């Protein structure tokens, strides 16, 4: 019997990858917002690559589900040179989700401190902007920018993989131009 | 003590009017104490426990008859006899009740704070009289393991992957885990506080976001609670659409988690394969209902939009190809010995523990406890469909993966049948403007979600408690890992995939 793994590999060799062909364009709003933010800050030569450390600072987990989706073969984030890394010390970008809970506030600050400069902070989701539907709770500080400075916000509840991609590509493009 | 049934026992208390669809009984101190005595021996499982400022409630199910009821006890001195000593699954719930509502569980040995890390603007924030905040964050005294050559590995709250925050403290001897202790609460958003006094539509949005991966199940349980409280009859078609959404959610989560478990055994091709399948479901959701996760699609009174004929055809098409791809994934899983080597007999949970903690979902079903809310108490449209609930007894990572494969397959059947048998008609009705108390249950992919609420006549939520199945599953993960090696923890953890956000609330 041909092992199933061989069948799958053969099929994909013949049929080509699943990857979405029409990659989204960088979000123009994002580019503007960033160009301004980056103008004042030190820039390293990133060589068209970005390493992202994801930090869940209190999300409902919906945003994380869509972040996983951009890593799957269909959106295949890595083809743009963007990848998720395991430690903030390896990261250029912190992608922060959720309303920041009081119980996560210090962990978020410490993760930011552990990320070498230059670093960019992207707040993701409606919660990341201002706390979303959790704003005003005793247990929530608010949006990400209430705790650490934010360079770009990707809106949505949760943002779709396309929106996430467009936002991250905007970030890459801006970083790259300078 | 005899073979008294749950309802016979509770009828010794005072029946509270206006609680639907299951009765609620108020017990005095004697009654509450007797309840605890009965819980020592009776086959009544605890579905959820929650508090108000000076009252404690517990939802119970008589496993023999399937009857459900809520028992309540007023505790004006802000102390109540803990149920945790006879039902260990609720120990963390009672610790959380103390932190948030300020009611003290008397008799509970573990007095450590659970959700409160000493960082809120007040202690016991929802109590009648909240206390002043702590001067500094709590130092959490982890349980100790003593012996030669033991070392600790602290992990989290920020983990290495794209995952919710929580802290794990491992005590290890070499590679073997001697004890794992969890510390959760990092995701605590104060949801019960936000729900108090919220108008219905706002409350529905919040409950839909208690745990994003189970948003359909939460919306469904919430809607059913509201409909029970107000006596609202939902049109038949709405039930069937709700069923379709719920099964789509189950499939999406199961296939993704199967891929993730395999990925943690360094078998990445499965993650890719399953990631593509998951994406197919989410895109179908987007086309059919206008949201990839179907957030806010189920609303009290029905569903927020109908499915078109073209949508039905598109879905049938998806289902056909999907079943074949899922089967390929299953063959790949079953016929890869290096993968079985990691999953078989890893992270075993004993059936007796599953029963003691009342754990449901695939965690329960992989260890011999077949409870599924779609069967008991059942609710539309499942009451009109026969379904198979897969049950295995091995209780290891492999069993949890196999149960999920079987459930995903079953969901495809169910969706197919729902599409064929779905009645025509309206999909939403206005809610009667009445006050009441109600409870709703829905089987999420993870297990039984319970929502209890009290609604004012102006449709403002006076009190609402959403209960996540993870409460009863998290502690079992600690048991599952014991004696395994550290490197198998990701596999065990993923095979459980407990919710952080749903548990932390
Ligand atoms: S933005 Fe929406 S999906 Fe993201 S964490 Fe907030 S509630 Fe969840």
Image (tube, coloured by chain):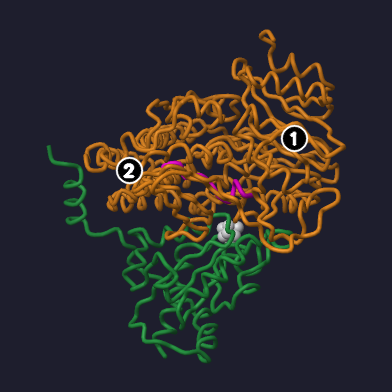
Q: Which mark is residue B321?
A: 2
Residue at 60% x, 38% y is B449
Chain bearing tag 1 is: B
Q: Quadrant of the N terminus of chain B?
A: top right
Residue that carries the numbered disc 1 in the rendered image? B106
**Residue B308 shows in the view:** no
Q: Nearer the viewer, residue A151 or B108?
A: B108
On the same chain: label 1 and label 2? yes
Q: Nearer the viewer, mark 1 or mark 2?
A: 1
Residue at 45% x, 25% y is B368
Mark toward the start of the polypeptide (1 vs 2):
1
Vertical comparison of B11 with B173: above or below = above
Q: Which chain is orange?
A: B
- Which span of residues is magenta-colored? B495-505
Q: Nearer the viewer, residue B91 or B202?
A: B91
Q: Main secondary structure of the magenta part?
A: helix
Q: Give left or right: position of B311 versus A19.
A: right
- Density class for disc 2 (Cα within 10 Å; few <14, some 14-19, many ≥20) is few
Q: Residue furthest front?
A: B148
Secondary structure of residue under mark 2: helix
**Ligand 1 shown in quarter:** bottom right
Magenta segment includes A12 = no
Q: Quadrant of residue A25?
A: bottom left
Vertical comparison of B312 with B81: above or below = below
Residue at 84% x, 25% y is B28
| Residue B390 image point, x, y percent | 42, 27
User: Whole-Å distance between the Cαs marked 1 and 2?
Assistant: 56 Å
Secondary structure of residue under mark 1: strand
Q: Colour of chain A?
A: green
Magenta segment includes B496 = yes
């Amino acid at each position: 019997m041909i092992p199933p793994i061989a069948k799958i590999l053969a099929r994909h060799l013949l049929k080509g990858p699943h990857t979405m062909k029409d990659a989204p364009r960088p979000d123009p709003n994002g580019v503007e917002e960033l160009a301004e933010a980056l103008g004042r800050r030190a820039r390293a030569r990133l060589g068209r690559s970005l390493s992202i450390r994801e930090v869940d600072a209190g999300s409902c987990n919906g945003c994380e589900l869509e972040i996983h989706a951009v890593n799957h073969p269909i959106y295949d984030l890595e083809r743009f040179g963007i990848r998720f890394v395991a430690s903030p010390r390896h990261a250029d970008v912190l992608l922060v989700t959720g309303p920041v809970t009081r119980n996560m506030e210090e962990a978020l600050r410490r993760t930011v401190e552990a990320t070498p400069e230059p670093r960019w902070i992207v707040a993701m989701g409606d919660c990341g902007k201002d706390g979303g539907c959790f704003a005003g709770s005793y247990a929530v500080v608010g949006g990400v920018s209430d705790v650490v400075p934010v360079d770009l916000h990707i809106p949505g509840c949760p943002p779709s993989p396309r929106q996430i991609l467009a936002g991250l590509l905007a970030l890459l493009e801006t970083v790259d131009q300078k | 003590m005899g073979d008294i049934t749950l309802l016979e026992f509770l009828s010794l208390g005072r029946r509270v009017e206006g609680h639907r669809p299951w009765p609620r009984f108020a017990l005095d101190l004697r009654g509450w104490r007797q309840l605890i005595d009965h819980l020592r021996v009776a086959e009544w499982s605890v579905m959820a426990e929650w508090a108000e400022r000076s009252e404690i409630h517990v939802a119970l199910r008589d496993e023999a008859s399937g009857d459900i009821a809520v028992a309540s006890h007023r505790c004006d001195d802000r102390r109540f006899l803990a149920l945790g000593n006879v039902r260990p699954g609720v120990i963390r719930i009672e610790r959380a009740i103390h932190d948030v509502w300020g009611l003290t569980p008397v008799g509970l040995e573990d007095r450590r704070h659970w959700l409160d890390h000493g960082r809120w603007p007040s202690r016991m924030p929802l109590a009648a009289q909240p206390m002043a905040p702590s001067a500094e964050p709590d130092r959490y005294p982890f349980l100790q393991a003593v012996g030669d050559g033991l070392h600790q590995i602290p992990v989290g709250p920020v983990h290495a992957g794209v995952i919710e925050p929580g802290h794990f403290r491992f005590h290890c001897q070499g590679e073997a885990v001697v004890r794992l202790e969890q510390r959760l609460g990092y995701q605590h958003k104060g949801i019960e506080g936000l729900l108090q006094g919220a108008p219905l539509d706002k409350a529905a949005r919040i409950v839909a976001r208690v745990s994003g991966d189970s948003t359909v199940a939460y919306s469904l349980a919430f809607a059913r609670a509201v409909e029970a409280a107000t006596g609202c009859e939902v049109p038949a078609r709405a039930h069937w659409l709700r069923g379709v959404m719920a099964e789509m959610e189950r499939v999406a989560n199961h296939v993704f988690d199967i891929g993730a478990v395999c990925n943690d055994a360094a078998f990445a091709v499965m993650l890719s394969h399953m990631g593509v399948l998951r994406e197919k479901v989410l895109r179908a959701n987007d086309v059919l209902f206008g949201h990839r996760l179907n957030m806010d699609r189920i609303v009290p009174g029905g569903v927020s939009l109908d499915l078109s004929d073209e949508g039905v055809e598109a879905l049938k098409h998806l289902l056909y190809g999907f079943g074949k791809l899922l089967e390929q994934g299953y063959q790949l899983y079953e016929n890869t010995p290096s993968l079985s080597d990691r999953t078989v007999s890893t992270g075993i949970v004993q059936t007796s523990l599953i029963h003691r903690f009342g754990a449901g979902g695939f965690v329960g079903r992989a260890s011999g406890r077949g409870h599924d809310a779609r069967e008991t108490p059942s609710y539309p449209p499942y009451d009109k469909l026969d379904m198979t609930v897969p049950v295995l007894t091995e209780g290891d990572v492999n069993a949890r993966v196999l149960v999920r494969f079987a459930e995903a397959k079953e969901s495809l059947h169910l969706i197919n049948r729902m599409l064929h048998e779905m009645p025509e008609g309206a999909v939403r009705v206005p809610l009667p403007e009445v006050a009441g108390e109600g409870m709703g249950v829905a089987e999420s992919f993870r297990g039984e979600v319970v929502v209890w609420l009290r609604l004012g006549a102006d449709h403002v939520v006076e009190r609402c408690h959403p209960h996540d199945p993870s409460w009863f599953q998290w502690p079992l993960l600690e048991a599952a890992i014991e004696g395994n090696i550290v490197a198998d923890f990701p596999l065990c953890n993923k095979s459980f995939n407990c919710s952080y956000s749903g548990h932390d609330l």
